[in-house]
């Protein structure tokens, strides 16, 4: 192990500290503490030791309690602890190992044994640290792949309708804004937390992925759709769900796609049960789908489409207000009404056309 490794010796007897320091100092940097409280301060500081030699029998906080507190704190739990003790009972050793110690050294000290055991534990720690680094790097790689997969799939839908390039960015940010505002509401506590909201933000671009399967003459039709064409358009929710399910089946860990599937299949459901494709109502609609319903409708109204000009921000807000308890979750609408200016700001930031910006800044209905 590198000579820069630091050993913390904890013993209430200065003579024992001197003996251990003299044994270890030719190879390692040695710090000392004469009680458990001081040991915890050093171990949880910005410059923690690489290993701790901890006396068991100390006045006040003994070694067992000190070890327990070391292992319960995130800044010190990974530091290996070797007990140094005059106790020799098997039960004493077992108690220390149960608390998280990695080894025992008995008094009186045998210098070569001390050096060997310290070196062995530091070598093991080096390998553990390296393994943790590899696991962290692999985790970051997987998360990056997840994000790239979602972004690539979302871009497919965008390519089918080049007039709505900002739609993905806008709806992502709407849904995050609304979800964060609802997080403190106990009615959504089990569904919305920072991790879930981050996944919602990243999954939102896939809400219309099923539109890649809709034929151009329907998807890009400038006029009103016929009843048959509307039925075909409605199928994009099922197409989206099925395409994400196909990908999910091929991945070992597809938990990150759960929100994407929920949003794809449920963002056109309505609170009163009159939506599609399954006619879900009320709380039977996933929270993710209820959030996207507001985000998607608001954005559709303030955006230019091949079949319509953009409506004003005020018109979109009033439309959602009128849909409270019929189209939309009433609690979510109430929260949306507190956030309308933030919605407007997001829409302006990611607007696709100057015409949309003008309507967003228009104070008339």
Image (cartoon, rainbow, N blue to C red):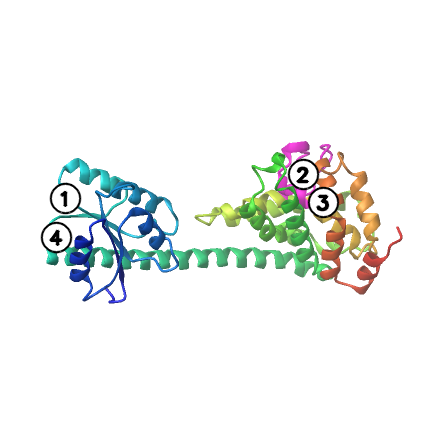
What SS does tag 1 mark? Answer: loop
Distance between the alpha carbons at the discs numbered 4 and 2? 75 Å
Question: Which residue was labeled with disc 2?
Answer: 277
Drawn side of residue 254 relative to residue 285, left or right: left
Drawn side of residue 323 relative to residue 116, left or right: right
Distance between the alpha carbons at the discs numbered 3 and 2? 17 Å
Indicate which label's residue lies in the foreground, 3 or 2: 3
- Residue appearing at x 71%, y 42% in the figure: 335
Question: Which residue was labeled with disc 4?
Answer: 109
Distance between the alpha carbons at the discs numbered 1 and 2? 73 Å
Distance between the alpha carbons at the discs numbered 1 and 3? 69 Å
Specify few, some or many for label 3: CA neighbours under 10 Å numbering under 14, 14-19, or 20 or more: many
Locate residue 212, reporting x and y percent.
Answer: 65, 54
In this view of the protein, which residue sits in the foreground, 34 or 84? 34
> Do we see residue 224 in this rendering?
no
Question: Which residue was labeled with disc 1?
Answer: 86
Number of numbered labels in the structure image: 4
Question: Which residue was labeled with disc 3?
Answer: 294
């Amino acid at each position: 192990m590198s000579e820069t490794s630091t050993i913390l010796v904890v013993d209430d007897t200065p003579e024992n500290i001197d003996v251990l320091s003299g044994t270890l100092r030719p190879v390692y940097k040695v710090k000392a503490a004469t009680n458990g409280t001081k040991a915890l301060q050093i171990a949880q500081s910005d410059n923690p030791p690489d290993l701790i030699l901890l006396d068991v029998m100390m006045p006040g906080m003994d070694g067992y309690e000190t070890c327990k507190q070391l292992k319960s704190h995130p800044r010190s739990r990974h530091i290996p602890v070797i007990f140094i003790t005059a106790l020799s009972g098997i039960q004493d050793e077992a108690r220390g190992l149960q608390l998280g110690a990695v080894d025992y050294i008995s008094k009186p000290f045998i210098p070569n044994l001390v050096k060997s055991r310290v070196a062995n534990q530091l070598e093991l720690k080096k390998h553990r640290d390296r393994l943790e680094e590899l696991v962290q790097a692999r985790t970051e790689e997987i998360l990056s792949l997840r994000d790239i997969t979602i972004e690539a799939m979302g871009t497919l839908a965008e390519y089918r309708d080049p007039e709505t390039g900002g739609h993905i960015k806008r709806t992502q940010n709407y849904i995050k804004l609304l979800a964060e505002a609802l997080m403190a509401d106990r009615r959504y506590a089990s569904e919305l937390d920072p991790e879930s909201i981050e996944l919602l933000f990243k999954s939102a671009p896939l809400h219309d992925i099923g539109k890649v399967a809709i034929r151009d003459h329907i998807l890009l039709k400038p006029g009103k759709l016929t009843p048959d064409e509307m039925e075909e358009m409605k199928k994009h929710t099922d197409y989206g769900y099925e395409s994400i399910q196909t990908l999910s089946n091929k991945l070992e860990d597809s938990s990150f796609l759960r929100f994407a599937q929920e949003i794809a299949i449920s963002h056109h459901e309505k609170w009163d049960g009159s939506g599609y494709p399954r006619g879900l109502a009320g709380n039977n609609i996933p929270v993710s789908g209820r959030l996207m319903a507001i985000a998607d409708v608001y954005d559709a109204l303030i955006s230019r489409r091949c079949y319509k000009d953009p409506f004003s921000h005020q018109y979109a807000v009033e439309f959602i207000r009128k849909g409270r308890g019929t189209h939309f979750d009433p609690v979510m609408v109430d929260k949306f009404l507190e956030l309308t200016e933030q919605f407007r700001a997001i829409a302006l930031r990611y607007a696709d056309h100057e015409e949309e910006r003008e309507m967003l800044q228009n104070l008339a209905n």
